[in-house]
Amino acid sequence: MRRQNLALVLREVAAAGPLSRADVAAASGLTRAAVSSLVEELIGSGLLAELGPAPSGRVGRPGTALTLNPQGPAGLGAEVGVEHLAACAVDLRGEVRAWRRVAADNRTRPAAETLADLAALLRTVAAEVAPELHPAGLGLAVPGLVGVQAGLVQRAANLGWSGLPVIAVLRSQLRAVGAPELAALPAEVDNEANLGGLAELWLGGHDGAEDFVHISAEAGIGAALIVAGRLFRGARGFAGELGHVPVEPEGPPCPCGARGCLEQYAGERAVRRAAGTAAVGGDWVGLLTERAAAGDRAVLAALERAGTALGTAVAGAVNLIDPAAVILGGGYAELGEWLLPGMHRELAARVTVRPWSPEWLAVSSLGRRGPLLGAATGVVRAIVEDPGRFAAR
């Protein structure tokens, strides 16, 4: 019961703080004496901090305002992309306190080498926020299938990973770069599209929307299905593989073994090939955005084709689960101006469960930052949801 009440108090402050002890008691239904005891425990655990007098509008001595501790535990986020590595730290309030992203060609190099560089990046980020913040956990985003077995990436085709115990390897590399304290942290790995979808739910500012499809693209195409405010993972954890939904049964072969998959029309390689930029290295989203804005006809045609294919595939998802919204995230968010027309056209023609409204298709404000934010924010949200578990470590 006390563990539940600790969570109740911390959630009240997280949702509406700063609050006085009296405010928390009124909002939670707990007695003032119980709240005072719980608050002292949360302060002692480094989860709450006192700001000073809290204006209340009531007669008498004002209470002390409580807030989530901005100098307490932090969530570390890490991301392995096909062409980049990234790491960040967020405090209990969800504010980003350090952010690092570096270009890295991870397509062909050994996983251990990629994760060694990521470990060094995490050590740098942790050093940037010390001593004010101390990492309490680590979330890792990867562009691959992450099943029910903890810490294991089943397959990340664009990285050449298969059956990789990625958390164990990353822990080893953290110890190798002189960060044993980070290697000892609780750590979880998830698909980057899933974490992007969760970041959209938590940080996207969609006015309480709890049912949506979040689509993102890196080298491949993924989707997160948010149903009733929760991530739908499927029976084996592989839900959301939108990139391998067929849009043309007799279309070009896909490395997955099927034909006509969405990735063969709207994935990075397909779009770059159609746009004539396949041989140009670097940031493919930035390059396409620049050339599309300049009116490059090949790029505009490639993006129109990609938008049409995306609309065809997404229409099936809309008909199946009837979401409140479809949100275009990841690299697609930056290309939305040119992808949306084709998507709207196909969705309007193919969605049959209800008349299609353009306002149901939105562009994420988080963009390519989503997966990393989701990875780090998940750590601090877990603390707020169960502070007793954190304090017991």
Image (cartoon, rainbow, N blue to C red):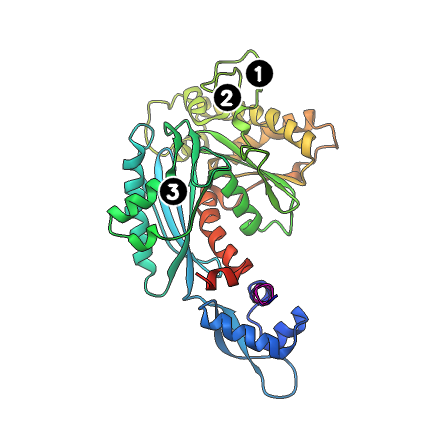
Nearer to me, 200 or 346: 200
**How many numbered badges does the structure rendering display?**
3
Residue drawn where x is 43% and y is 29% of the image: 155
SS state under label 3: helix
- Amino acid under disc 1: Glu
Spatial distance from mark 1 to mark 2, Cα to Cα? Answer: 10 Å
From the image, tell me which residue sits under label 1.
Answer: 248
Relative placement, left or right, of 314 versus 111 is right
Residue at 35% over, 38% down: 84
The residue that label 3 is drawn on is 167
Q: CA distance from mark 2 to mark 3?
A: 33 Å
Residue 159 coordinates in the image, percent (x, y) = 37, 30
**Mark nearer the N terminus (2 vs 3):** 3
Give percent across and percent down for residue 57. Answer: 64, 81
Q: Please provide the residue range marked out in magenta.
A: 2-8
Mark 3 surroundings: few (<14), some (14-19) or many (≥20) residues within 10 A: many
Q: Is residue 132 left or right of residue 375?
A: left
Tell me whether the residue at label 3 lies in contact with that at label 1, contact meaning CB atoms closer than 8 angstroms.
no
In the rendering, at what x and y percent does residue 92 appear?
47, 61
Q: Amino acid at mark 2?
A: Tyr
Residue furthest to the top in view is: 250
Q: Earlier in the sequence, mark 3 or mark 1?
A: 3
Name the residue beneath numbered marker 2. 265
- The Cα–Cα distance between marks 3 and 1, rounded to whole angstroms, is 37 Å
